[in-house]
């Protein structure tokens, strides 16, 4: 099943792209809730390049690596990647009021669709707040 989340980010296309693809930015926004954080991020932004973000509970009780390989990179427009047997696509589209960032991803079988949508949306909302904060 394919799941979609999106937001409009107030900012320039260049800044939105940079914040989405730069490890120093990713560790600032990549979490679905306040009790989680990303402790390390690596990005090799090219077709065939790898990415990895270490996501951990702040209390140290659990963590995992969200990792995959880029399958398409169109600067300031589109990123596609494979993570395990699943895929995701991110598009960056200028619209009135900013940049629409849309993420379409393959859901997994373990958790309900709505739970997955809410988690990915929370991360995207954190991303928008990060860009708009000017950090």
Image (cartoon, rainbow, N blue to C red):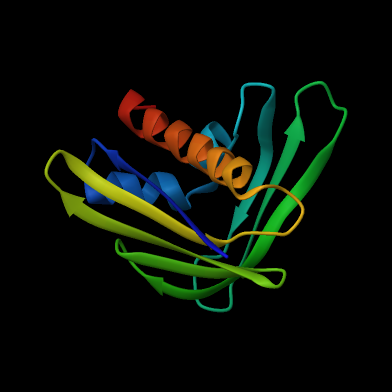
Whole-percent x, y for residue 17 in the image:
35, 52
Whole-percent x, y for residue 59 in the image:
82, 21
Which residue: 39% across, 28% down?
A: 129
Q: Quadrant of the N terminus?
A: bottom right
Side of 23 where 132 appears, left or right: left
Q: Quadrant of the C terminus?
A: top left
Instruction: Identify the residue at the far left of this view.
Output: 96
Side of 67 where 130 appears, left or right: left
Which residue: 85% across, 27% down?
A: 60
Which residue: 69% across, 22% down?
A: 35
Judging depth in this view, the residue of 52 and 36 nearest the camera is 36
Does residue 94 appear anywhere in the picture? yes
Does residue 24 appear anywhere in the picture? no
Q: Is residue 114 above or below residue 68?
A: above
Side of 63 where 127 appears, left or right: left
Judging depth in this view, the residue of 26 and 101 nearest the camera is 101
Quarter of image, res 15: top left
Judging depth in this view, the residue of 102 and 135 nearest the camera is 102
Total marks shown come to 0
Q: Is residue 99 above or below residue 134?
A: below
Whole-percent x, y for residue 6 in the image:
37, 47
Quarter of image, res 34: top right
Q: Is residue 100 above or below residue 33?
A: below
Which residue: 76% across, 35% down?
A: 56
Q: Is residue 124 above or below residue 83?
A: above
Judging depth in this view, the residue of 66 and 112 nearest the camera is 112
Side of 55 where 130 appears, left or right: left
């Amino acid at each position: 099943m394919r799941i979609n989340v999106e937001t409009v980010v107030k900012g320039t296309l260049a800044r939105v792209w940079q914040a989405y693809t730069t490890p120093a930015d990713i560790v600032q926004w990549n979490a679905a809730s306040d009790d989680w954080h990303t402790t390390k991020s690596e990005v090799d932004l090219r077709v065939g390049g790898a990415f990895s973000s270490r996501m951990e509970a702040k209390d140290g009780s659990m963590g995992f690596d969200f990792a995959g390989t880029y399958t398409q990179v169109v600067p300031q427009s589109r990123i596609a990647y494979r993570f395990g047997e699943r895929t995701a696509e991110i598009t960056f589209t200028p619209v009135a009021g900013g940049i629409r960032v849309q993420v379409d991803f393959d859901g997994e079988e373990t958790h309900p669709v709505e739970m997955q949508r809410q988690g990915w949306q929370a991360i995207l909302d954190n991303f928008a707040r990060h860009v708009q904060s000017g950090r």
